[in-house]
């Protein structure tokens, strides 16, 4: 393996991390680093369970990226992966979504005239874009739908909120709670980033009985089985073309 040829996959919780790990043949190794623990697959992929939410995701991802850079073996790609809510009818339960754009949906200010993203207040960023060539290849091998994946700090629980998010982000296909945090950490170190969400529930009225976490985790394992060789080959041949 050459420098920059490794992939870091960040999931929120261990069950998601282990679903991704199952897609890689061979044994895994635990690697403990300051501020973060990794699961290293035989295929050159490191997996980290960051905890739920964008802040925790950014902190763990940054720790893993910094450790790799200091070790002289930086990652060539960062992938945020996990289960997520799917906007209906475009992203049905059990389907896979990959990010063209990773957008934070609730970072800003509420005003009498509606929500203002933080960029309109003169600060920061609200979106990151995944490399087009990588998205194309990921879609071709997995059949995933490409679009915007939203990051929220509060899971959407009403039809009104789902409609409001879609009005502000017409290309949104899914929502999760970590993507923007992972992307901020990746971009801060000049690393390309992709988000992959397996849909476990519809975005909309809260209905715990409608969750299909097992189906989504199976979709995640199957998706990564197809995606893993593509990620590796993209890093080898195309990473310098991004975005
Ligand atoms: O209690 C609820 O109603 C509820 C509904 C959906 C998700 C949750 C979670 O606590 C899961 C958070 C966890 O899973 C990802 N995830 C899965 N579905 C969604 C979603 O619809 N919206 C946002 N995040 C979702 C998320 O990335 C977290 O890691 C609770």
Image: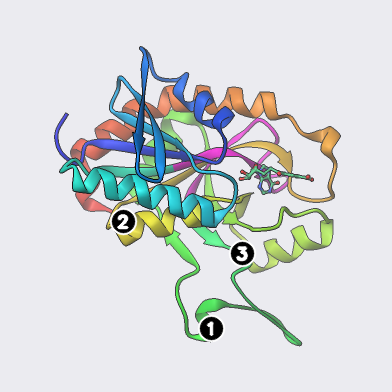
Residue 116 image position (x, y, % from top left): 62, 80
Q: Which residues are the magenta region?
A: 80-100
Disc on res. 120: 1
| Corner quadrant of residue 43 | top left
Q: If you read the primary sequence from the N terminus, does the residue marked by circle 2 or circle 3 appear first?
A: 3
Front residue of this view, candidates 35 and 51: 35
Ligand 1 quadrant? Answer: top right
Q: Is residue 40 above or below residue 182?
A: above
Question: On the picture, is 44 further left or further right than 89?
Answer: left
- Other-residue count near label 2 (Cα within 10 Å), few / some / many at <14 / 14–19 / ≥20: some
| Corner quadrant of residue 215 | top right
**CB under 8 Å between callouts 1 and 3?**
no
Q: CA distance from mark 1 to mark 2?
A: 24 Å
Q: Quadrant of the C terminus?
A: bottom left
Name the residue carrying label 2: 243
Q: Residue at x 50, y 68 (%)?
A: 126
Name the residue carrying label 3: 105
Q: CA distance from mark 2 to mark 3?
A: 22 Å
Q: How many marks?
A: 3
Q: If you read the primary sequence from the N terminus, does the residue marked by circle 1 or circle 2 appear first?
A: 1
Q: Nearer the viewer, mark 2 or mark 3?
A: 3
């Amino acid at each position: 393996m050459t420098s920059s040829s490794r992939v870091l996959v960040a999931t929120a919780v261990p069950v998601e991390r282990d679903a991704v790990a199952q897609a890689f043949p061979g044994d895994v190794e635990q690697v403990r680093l300051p501020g973060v623990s990794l699961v290293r697959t035989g295929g050159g992929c490191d997996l980290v369970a960051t905890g739920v939410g964008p802040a925790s995701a950014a902190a763990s991802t940054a720790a893993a990226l910094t450790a790799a850079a200091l070790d002289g073996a930086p990652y060539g790609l960062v992938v945020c992966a996990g289960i997520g809510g799917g906007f209906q009818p475009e992203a049905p339960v059990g389907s896979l979504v990959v990010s063209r754009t990773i957008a934070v949906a609730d970072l800003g200010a509420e005003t009498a005239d509606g929500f203002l993203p933080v960029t309109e207040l003169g600060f920061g960023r609200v979106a990151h874009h995944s490399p087009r060539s990588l998205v194309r290849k990921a879609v071709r091998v997995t059949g995933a739908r490409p679009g915007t994946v939203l990051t929220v700090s509060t899971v959407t629980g009403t039809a009104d909120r789902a409609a409001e998010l879609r009005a502000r982000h017409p290309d949104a296909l899914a929502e999760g709670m970590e993507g923007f945090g992972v992307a901020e950490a990746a971009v801060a170190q000049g690393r390309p980033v992709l988000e992959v969400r397996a849909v476990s529930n519809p975005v909309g009225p809260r209905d715990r009985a409608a969750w299909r976490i097992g189906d989504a985790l199976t979709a995640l394992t199957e998706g990564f089985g197809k995606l893993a060789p593509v990620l590796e080959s993209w890093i080898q041949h195309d990473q310098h073309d991004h975005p």
